[in-house]
Image (cartoon, rainbow, N blue to C red):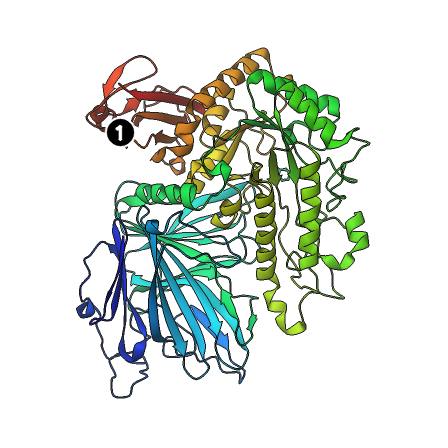
Amino acid sequence: MRILHDPVARAFFLQGPGSTYAFRVGPAGRLEHLHWGEQVGAQDLGWSVLHCDRAFSPNPDPADRSWSADTLAQECPSAAGCDYRAPMIEVRHGDGSRVLELVYAGHRLVAGKPRLDGLPATYCEADTEAETLVVELCDAPTGLAVELSYTVFAAHDVIARSVRVINRGAAPVTLLRVLSASVDLEGSGLALLQLSGSWARERHVHVTSLRPGLQAVESRRGTSSHQHNPFIALLDTGTGEESGRVWAANLVYSGNFFAGVELDQFMQARLHLGIHPDGFAWELAPGTAFQAPEAILAFSAHGLGALSRTLHRLYRTRLCRGRWRDAERPVLLNNWEATYFNFTPERLLTIARSAKEAGIELFVLDDGWFGKRESDVSGLGDWVVNEAKLPGGLARLAREVEAIGLRFGLWFEPEMVSPDSDLYRAHPDWCLHAPGRTRSQGRNQLVLDVGRAEVREHIRAAVAQVLRAAPISYVKWDMNRHLTEVGSLGLPAHRQGEAAHRFVLGVYEVMERLTAEFPDVLFEGCSGGGGRFDPGILHYMPQVWTSDNSDAVSRLWIQHGTSIAYPLSSMAAHVSAVPNHQVHRTTSFATRAAVAFTGSFGFELDLARQSPEDMAEAKAQVAAYKRLRSLLARGDLYRLADPAGGRLAAWMVVAADGGEALVTAVRIRAEAHDSVPVVRLRGLDPAARYRLDDGNEVGGDALMAVGLRHRFDRDYQARTWHLVRV
Ligand code: DGJ
C-alpha cells in the first residue's frame, strides 16, 4: 500500500494491494482522472490524456481549444461550467449562480484513516493499516473548499473515498448535490450490474448493457430500500464469476442515494454515487462544513467472485465493529412466524423449551410485547411492556427463558410511532410532516423526526430503559415503512431540504449511543426484512434480517444477490415452517437448513409443533451448524452456479487456509430422466487431498477440474458436501 505524489507530473498514485487509482492536477489546476484498474507503477501518464479540439465542447482558456471538461476524464466534476455531464458537486451561491470552479489548492498525506463526523465508515485499528490522501480544491471567488479523501488499505484492495465541503467564505452557500464519488472510465462494452427488487424479493442481480445517456439506480424512499441497493458494478465484456474486469461502488449510507452511470458522446462512462440530490438542499453557513458519506470503490481483474471476497473481508473486519464482529453468533429462534401477535407467556415458553431441546441458544420475542399492540394498528412508540399480556413483565419472561438455558432477545421499531399511541397523543408534532397537510401512513404508522435532538433522546432513553430492566442479549431493530412528507418542525423553512439527511444522521447517532452503552448486546438490523441492508447499518449491527421472505427457494436469489457485496455473516437466514408463509411453497427441512446455513442461522417457527422426525432433523442441523459456523462466518465464498439459470444453485465456503470447505447445491427444477449436474469447486489447495463426508479422499486439483456430481430426483432438493484437508 502506498500513496505516491509525483510533483513534476502533478499526479497522485493510490496503490492498493492489486490495483491502482491515479489522477493529476491538469491545466489551470483542474483535477483529471487518469486510471482506475490494474496495478501500474507510478509514472507520468500524461500521454494517455488526449487533449483535442471538439465541436460544441467549450474551453475555459480561449488560447487552448483542446482542453474542455466536457471531453476529458474528470476527478471532481462541478456544475454549470464546461462539463455537460452530470456533476458530482452543485451549489447555489448567494447571488443565485451555480457556477463552481474547483481548482487544486493543496494536499496532505495522513497515516491511517480519519473518522467521518457522525457517519459510519470503514476504519483501521492501527495507523500502519492504511494511508489517506486529502486533496483540497477551492472555488476562489467564494472561498468554498472541497476536500477529497482517499484511503488505501494494506490488506484490502479498495479505495475508501469521501468528500467534505467547507465554507471558508463570508456568505452562506446552499449545497444542492454533494456526491461521494465520481469516476470517468472508458465505457465501451461495459454493462451495469445492480441489486434490485422489492419487499420480500430484495437484491436480485440485474445486468444491462450501458447505452448512451444516464442509467440510474436510486432510492428516494428515505432509506436505502428493498427496491434498490446502494451498490453498483460495471462489468467488462465477458466478465463472470472467475474472470474479467469489474469496477464496483458501494455507499456507506442508509438513506436516499443516487448511483448513476452516464455514457457520454465519446463512450466514456461516468460512475456516480452519493446522497440523492432530489429533495436535498443543505445551507452551509460560513465557517461550517458538510461531510458526505463514504463510498467504497473496488476493482477486480478476476471477476465478480474476487470482488465479493474483497468486500466481504473488508466489511467483516473493518466496517463491522464491537464484540460481535468476531464472536460466534448464537443460533436463535424468533417467534414471529410461529405466533405473530398472538402469544401468551406459556406459548412462548413452550416454544423456548423445544428450542432448547434442539440446541438453539437464543430465544427472540418479536413484535407485540409492548403498549397497546395486538396488531399493527397501534402501540409503536410506547416501549413499555404490556403486563396484561406478559404478567411480571420482560424481566420475568427473560429470567424464565434463561432458566430454560437460552438467552433472551427482543424486537423494537424505535424510529416509528403509531397515531394510536400515548407517544403520538403527547407529541403529535414529533413525526416527519408538512404542517397542514396529510400525514401519509405506511403499515398504519408515522415516522418519527429523528433529526430532532429531543426526539432522538426520547428514543434512546426509552430503548435503554428496557434493555437495562431485563437480561436482554439481542435486539432486532426493525423499520417498517418508508418516509413521506419529509418536513421537520426542527428546521426553519429555508432548511427543510436537510430533513431527510438529518433523519439518517439522527438514526446513526441513536444507534451509536445504544450500541456503545450495550456493547454485549447483539444488534440485528431489519427493515421489513432487507429494506435497509447496506454498509451504513453494518457499521452498527453486524447482521441484518435479509428478507421477510423466508422461503428456501426464494432465498437462493436473495442471498446470491446479497452476497455480491455483503458477507455471509451479515445475512440472517432462518428455517421457517411449510407451506412457507410468504410464497406457500413446501420444501424439505433439509433444504431449508442448507440454504439458511449460509448466513447467521436461526429458526422462525414453532418447533414444539413439528413432527418428531423434523425435531430430530432440527437437532442434527443445529449441531452441524455449531461445528461449521466459524468456517461459514469467516471463510471465503465461491458462487459456483447462479440460480438465475433456473435449474441449479451452488456455492461453497472455503477456510482462508484452504483446509476445510462446505459445498451446497440445490436443484431448483428437476426434470424427468434428469441430467446429473457437475459442480466444479474453487479455492481449494490443488496439491492437497480432501476427505469428503462419505469417507472418500480426493485431490483438490480433481475437485476443481472434474467436480462433484449428485443425482437429484426432485425439485428443491439440496445436497451438501463437507471437505477436510487430510
Ligand atoms: C417486519 C420484520 O421483517 C418481521 O420479521 C417482523 O419482525 C415484523 N416486522 C414484526 O412487525
- In terms of secondary structure, where does tag 1 sit? loop
Q: Nearer the viewer, residue 119 or 94?
A: 119
The image shows residue 687, relative to residue 323, as above or below, that is above
Q: Amino acid at mark 1?
A: Leu
Q: Position of residue 538 (x, y in %)?
A: 49, 45
Residue 367 position by quadrant = top right
Residue 357 position by quadrant = top right
Q: Nearer the viewer, residue 337 or 666?
A: 337
The image shows residue 393, relative to residue 437, as above or below, that is above
Say if disc 1 is inside 8 Å of ligand 1.
no
Residue at screen point 53% across, 18% down: 618
Q: Position of residue 368 (x, y in %)?
A: 72, 36
Q: Quadrant of ligand 1?
A: top right
Looking at the image, can residue 566 be seen? no
Q: Position of residue 492 (x, y in %)?
A: 67, 71
Q: Which residue is mark 1?
A: 684
Residue reaching furthest to the bottom? 62
Looking at the image, can residue 690 be seen? yes
Q: Nearer the viewer, residue 305 or 312?
A: 312
Q: Position of residue 18 (x, y in %)?
A: 25, 49
The image shows residue 240, relative to residue 617, as above or below, that is below
Count of numbered tags: 1
Residue at screen point 28% across, 47% down: 239
Q: How would you rate the neighbour count of disc 1 (Cα within 10 Å): few for under 14, some for 14-19, many for 20 or more?
A: many
Q: Nearer the viewer, residue 306 or 705?
A: 306
Residue at screen point 22% across, 77% down: 52
Q: What is the quadrant of the C terminus in the image?
A: top left
